[in-house]
Image (cartoon, grey):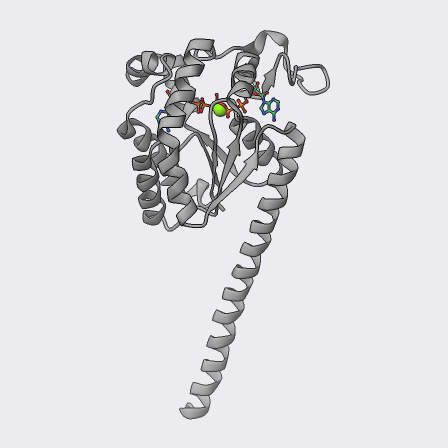
Amino acid sequence: MNLIIFGPPGAGKGTQSNNIISNFNLKQVSTGDLLRSEIKNQTDLGKKIESIINNGELVSDDVVNTLIRKIISDSNNFNRLIFDGYPRSISQAYRLEKLLKEFNQKISIVLNLKVDKDVVSKRVNGRVICIKCFRIFNVYLNPPNSKNHKCEKKYLEKRTDDNSKTVLNRYETYVAKSKPILDYYNKKELLLEIDGNQKIVEIYDKIKGILENIRDWHYVCFLYKFLWKNLTSLIYGSYSRYQYPSR
Ligand code: AP5
Ligand code: MG
């Protein structure tokens, strides 16, 4: 299954994706992480996009779509992607659908984490990320400690775009762009809203239940197709032998 995890900055998209990949055989694709790694490595692309990200604006569709194409076209990722922070505009949503079709895949569900604006700023301002194990923590709400984090403290860093001014811009960009995307997936009956204001574990329990149902349903469909294909060829095979016995 491929899924999209959607929501404003600080909704918990990264946190929940981390939880999902540790229980399901899926791979997280965070366009934000991919773009930040270009900046960190000071690639040509990284130098071009640094100020855009630090202003809380969106990087061009062309850049992001190219990164996504690389991932979808990789056969190791077939039907096992969590899109975190993508699509971010309606044109990205159209592009994603085209790309998935080209590689014989589709989206199983879009999980929309709904979070209040005042919750967002507290979460983002307190966020720290381990650059070694990539786990996400929060100095106020979910602090790292010896039980939940094994790496040394020196690996914990703040994101350069996690300051009050940029967070506000990111939130406003989200509000301006999100409605057509949500309408698009709603019409396709793929959208499921989740209250993202709840505790991390409560949200994850819900997501886990939803994904288990989808996984079970995929197994049933696979089994049905397999049996149908094999039974029909078996029946058809015996019927042809009966009609045209070999000499
Ligand atoms: P991106 O990295 O995607 O940032 P974002 O969308 O602003 O989302 P965040 O990563 O800030 O939040 P999150 O929902 O992942 O929350 P998290 O789990 O970390 O994008 C960054 C930038 O890159 C964009 O502004 C844009 O410039 C560019 N970009 C990215 N994708 C693009 C695209 N497709 N097109 C164009 N440009 C693109 O949690 C946040 C904090 O809250 C953590 O501290 C966590 O511990 C805590 N927390 C999480 N859940 C809970 C909870 N339930 N209760 C309490 N605390 C919680
Ligand atoms: Mg994130």
Q: Is residue 195 above or below residue 105?
A: above
Q: Relative to the observer, which residue lies in front, 188 or 71? A: 188
Q: Is residue 63 above or below residue 230?
A: above
Q: Residue furthest right?
A: 147
Q: Residue furthest top?
A: 154
Question: In the rendered image, which quarter is residue 74 located in?
Answer: top left
- Which percent across, then down, holds residue 84? 46, 31
Question: In the rendered image, which quarter is residue 186 located in?
Answer: top left
Q: Is residue 9 left or right of residue 60?
A: right
Instruction: Tell me which residue sits at (31%, 16%) in the image.
Output: 49
Instruction: Tell me which residue sits at (48%, 30%) in the image.
Output: 7
Q: Relative to the observer, which residue lies in front, 68 or 181? A: 181
Instruction: Tell me which residue sits at (34%, 44%) in the image.
Output: 97
Instruction: Tell me which residue sits at (49%, 81%) in the image.
Output: 235
Q: Relative to the observer, which residue lies in front, 199 or 80? A: 199
Residue 204 at least partly seen: yes
Q: Is residue 154 above or below residue 233?
A: above
- Which percent across, then down, holds residue 8? 47, 26
Question: In the rendered image, which quarter is residue 211 located in?
Answer: top right
- Which percent across, then down, holds residue 201? 67, 31
Residue 74 at least partly seen: no
- Which percent across, then down, holds residue 223? 55, 63
Name the image quarter holding the C terminus: bottom left
Total residue callouts:
0
